[in-house]
Structures are given as structure tokens and as C-alpha cells.
Image (spheres, rainbow, N blue to C red):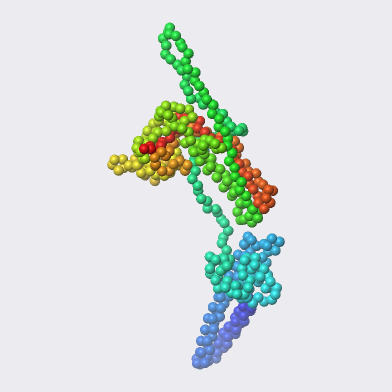
């Protein structure tokens, strides 16, 4: 670059002297001669070429400055022993090597260029270097020049959303410091009778109570990260991993609250048996209602199941169903081909409601209108379902078992069960 600058100075000096000489010719009135005119034309052409060369020099200077700035800002600018690869000597060698393709001046410059090229994974031999310059536009391939177009570091993480169910948001949530909690089920009425003044008064029925124990179940995860990744990756991997595990715990427990078997996991709402006779209360079971038609739904089905719920529970009642079932409901029409639900509500900013009660989407509910599927739960979830948290998420960081990795043993204990067997109603698609 210093040779180019020196040449530029010499050209500038030549141009200045040439212009001065032409001024002298003009003062003597000799500019009309053919010879002088030809020289002047050549001079103008030369001036244009020199101007273009000067512009090219300016462009190259800007490119060199941009390259130096980029190298100085790259996060991986060290080799582990404190030596900085953005040292001016390294940058000069790197710049010279790329511009001249080879022909490194002396042994020291060649050595410096080789070191920095090896550090960034660039070719060091003359043939590969020439190919690199020719293919520098192929930024999609690192060996073909992609190294010369580094991308901007991570600004944010794009996350995939997984389906889950909002049971924790609408259920009764309590905490405990013990293995399990015991809940008293008071679901029977006391006996009574009408008598005249002198009638005998026989013994009446004593209301029986029951005990429901909700144990807490343990969920665990044990991912590991290499120690080198923890040190070198540009994002905080530990925080990211812990957040991922916490989200997985949440999805797994929400699934259990809906469909859990009660074995090593909470007991789900849909795991309970249905009442033997519709309308006839049974402890440790829920009332299920079938749709009026085999394999399909109608608007009347939702009116019927809503009317099954006692008035005391209607105030806080919520519908819980899959979003695809909601789409089927939205498409129901009457005999005049008019929608039963006004689609304009969605465009007017009205919260999703069905028969005046809020709708909550649950990814763990059945998503298709098929025979035997449980397509909706309606009721007061705060009365009907109880979630028991033993302890929050606990993380044990283990860098000792395998020194190449750090393990994160993560646990959470939670339980859940239906605690009111008349506060929730389930709508099933009638089977043939």
C-alpha cells in the first residue's frame, strides 16, 4: 500500500508540473499548434486515467480499513495465550497476502500471514490462495470465500412453540412441604324427614365423608453440556438449557393433568370413569354426555352439557377443548345456512366464548370429531381439579462425574387430581 501511495504522490507532482507547462504555452500563444493540441489531448486522457486510479486507491483504502475493523471486532480474536490476531503486523500480512495472492515479502511477513490464515481456516499455499480470491463471491461456501463474509452474531433465539394445556392457569393450585396432601370429600347429604307433633322420630342417615390423598410425583431431567461449549458459545447455554427443561416440565405436567394415569404421575381429568347413570352422582367419577348424533356434533350438544352443570359452578365455568374442535364449532350452521356463532366476534376483539363462557385451548384434548373422542370439558376447574406443588424446580450442577461435561440433574415434584366430582362435565362424541 505504501508503494501505491508513493506512486500517487509522484503522479500528482507530474500532473502539477504538466499543468504549469501548459499554462506557459498558453501565455506564449503557442497552444494552437497541432503538436501542442495533440499533447494536450494525450494529457487530458492521462489525467482521466490517473483520476480513475486515484479513485481505485481510495476504494482499496476503505476496503482495507473495513477489513481491519471487522477483524478487530470479531469475538474470536485470541488464540488462547493472550496473543491478539488483530495486531497491526498480522493485519498487514493478512492484507498483503490476500491482495498479492502470494509473493509475501520476507520470511517474517510470510510467517505472520500463514499463522493468521491458519487461525481463521484459510488456505496458506499459493494455489489455494489464488482459488480463494477467484471464488471470493461464493459466500455460501466457507472454503470458497465464505470466511470473508462472517455473519452477525446471534441477536435472538427463534423458538418452536409446543402444544400444551392451560390447566394450571384455571385449576386450584396449592403447595405442601410433605410427600402428599389429604383432602376431605364432603359429598353426601344428611338425612331428614317431616313429622307431626306426636310422630316418632326415627334415626336419620349420617352423611359419610371420604378422604382423597393426592401424592406428589417426581419428574426429572439430566442433560449435559461440554465444558468447552459453556466457555466458548456466544449465548448463556446454562440459562438456555434450564429454561428448556422448565418448559418441558410444564408441558409434561399439563399433559398429566388432562390424561395422566395416576401411576408415577398426576391423575388426569379424563382418566376417571364416567357415572354409571347420567345425572346420578358418583364419587371418584365424572359425568360424561354423548353427542346427539353418532360421529358428529351439533349446537344442541353444547347447550345440553352446559345445562348439566349446577348453577353454583356456572359463575366460574370454563370450556376446555382443542383448537381444531373449536374450528368445527365455529363452522356449525343452522337450517338457513347461518353460523351459530357470529364469526365477526373474532374481528371485534371479543374474547373467545361459547354460550357466554370463556374458551381455553388445550393441546392434550382430542383434536378430531371422531367416535368415542373426549372433545370438551366444561365446568369450574378451581373447584373441580387441584394441583399440589411439593417444591419448585431443583437443579443439581455436577461438574465432577465426567470432567469433560457439566451435568444438570433437574427435578420437580407435583401432584394433581379431581377433587370435586360434580364441578366438571365431559362431552364425548357418540359411538355407534
Residue at the (56%, 78%) spot, across then down: 53
* Picture quadrant of residue 315: top left
For this rendering, which residue is in front, 86 or 32? 86
* Picture quadrant of residue 24: bottom right
Quarter of the image that includes the C terminus: top left
Query: Residue 2 placed where, x, y %?
Result: 64, 76
Q: Residue furthest front?
A: 432
Query: Residue 80 placed where, x, y %?
Result: 69, 60
**Image-based side of 81 in relation to 206, left or right:** right
Residue at the (48%, 33%) spot, across then down: 272
**Image-based side of 356 in relation to 131, left or right:** left
For this rendering, which residue is in front, 105 or 145? 145
Query: In this rendering, does residue 388 appear at all?
Result: yes
**Placement of 294 over or under 279, stated as above or below:** below
Query: Residue 366 placed where, x, y %?
Result: 44, 41
Query: In this rendering, does residue 257 appear at all?
Result: no
Query: Residue 185 placed where, x, y %?
Result: 51, 26
* Picture quadrant of residue 155: bottom right
**Placement of 405 over or under 300, stated as above or below:** below
Q: Residue furthest top?
A: 198
Amino acid at each position: 500500500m505504501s508503494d501505491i501511495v508513493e506512486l500517487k504522490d509522484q503522479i500528482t507532482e507530474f500532473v502539477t508540473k504538466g499543468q504549469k507547462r501548459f499554462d506557459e504555452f498558453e501565455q506564449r500563444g503557442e497552444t494552437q499548434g497541432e503538436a501542442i493540441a495533440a499533447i494536450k489531448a494525450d494529457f487530458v486522457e492521462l489525467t482521466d486515467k490517473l483520476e480513475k486510479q486515484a479513485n481505485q486507491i481510495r476504494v482499496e483504502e476503505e476496503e482495507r480499513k473495513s477489513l481491519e475493523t471487522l477483524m478487530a471486532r470479531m469475538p474470536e480474536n485470541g488464540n488462547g495465550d493472550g496473543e491478539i490476531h488483530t495486531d497491526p503486523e498480522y493485519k498487514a500480512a493478512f492484507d498483503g497476502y490476500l491482495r498479492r495472492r502470494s509473493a509475501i515479502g520476507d520470511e517474517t511477513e510470510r510467517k505472520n500471514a500463514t499463522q493468521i490464515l491458519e487461525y481463521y481456516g484459510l488456505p496458506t499455499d499459493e494455489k489455494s490462495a489464488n482459488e480463494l480470491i477467484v471464488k471470493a463471491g461464493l459466500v455460501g461456501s466457507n472454503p470458497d470465500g465464505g470466511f470473508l463474509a462472517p455473519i452477525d452474531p446471534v441477536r435472538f433465539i427463534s423458538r418452536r412453540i409446543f402444544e400444551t394445556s392451560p390447566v394450571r392457569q384455571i385449576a386450584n393450585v396449592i403447595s405442601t412441604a410433605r410427600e402428599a396432601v389429604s383432602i376431605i370429600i364432603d359429598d353426601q347429604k344428611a338425612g331428614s324427614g317431616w313429622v307431626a307433633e306426636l310422630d316418632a322420630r326415627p334415626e336419620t342417615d349420617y352423611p359419610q365423608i371420604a378422604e382423597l390423598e393426592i401424592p406428589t410425583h417426581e419428574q426429572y431431567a439430566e442433560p449435559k453440556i461440554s465444558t468447552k461449549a459453556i466457555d466458548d458459545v456466544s449465548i448463556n447455554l446454562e440459562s438456555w438449557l434450564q429454561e428448556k427443561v422448565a418448559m418441558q416440565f410444564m408441558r409434561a405436567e399439563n399433559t398429566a393433568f388432562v390424561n395422566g394415569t395416576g401411576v408415577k404421575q398426576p391423575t388426569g381429568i379424563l382418566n376417571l370413569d364416567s357415572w354409571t347413570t347420567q345425572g346420578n352422582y358418583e364419587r371418584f367419577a365424572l359425568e360424561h354426555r354423548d353427542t346427539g348424533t353418532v360421529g358428529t356434533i351439533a349446537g344442541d350438544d353444547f347447550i345440553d352439557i352446559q345445562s348439566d352443570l349446577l348453577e353454583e359452578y356456572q359463575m366460574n365455568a370454563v370450556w376446555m377443548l382443542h383448537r381444531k374442535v373449536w374450528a368445527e364449532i365455529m363452522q356449525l350452521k343452522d337450517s338457513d345456512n347461518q353460523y351459530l356463532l357470529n364469526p365477526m366476534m373474532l374481528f371485534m376483539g371479543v374474547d373467545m366464548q361459547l354460550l357466554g363462557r370463556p374458551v381455553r385451548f388445550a393441546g392434550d384434548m382430542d383434536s378430531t370429531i371422531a367416535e368415542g373422542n373426549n372433545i370438551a370439558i366444561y365446568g369450574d376447574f378451581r373447584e373441580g381439579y387441584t394441583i399440589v406443588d411439593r417444591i419448585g424446580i431443583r437443579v443439581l450442577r455436577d461438574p465432577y462425574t465426567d470432567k469433560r461435561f457439566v451435568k444438570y440433574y433437574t427435578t420437580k415434584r407435583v401432584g394433581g387430581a379431581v377433587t370435586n366430582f360434580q364441578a366438571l362435565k365431559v362431552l364425548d362424541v357418540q359411538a355407534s
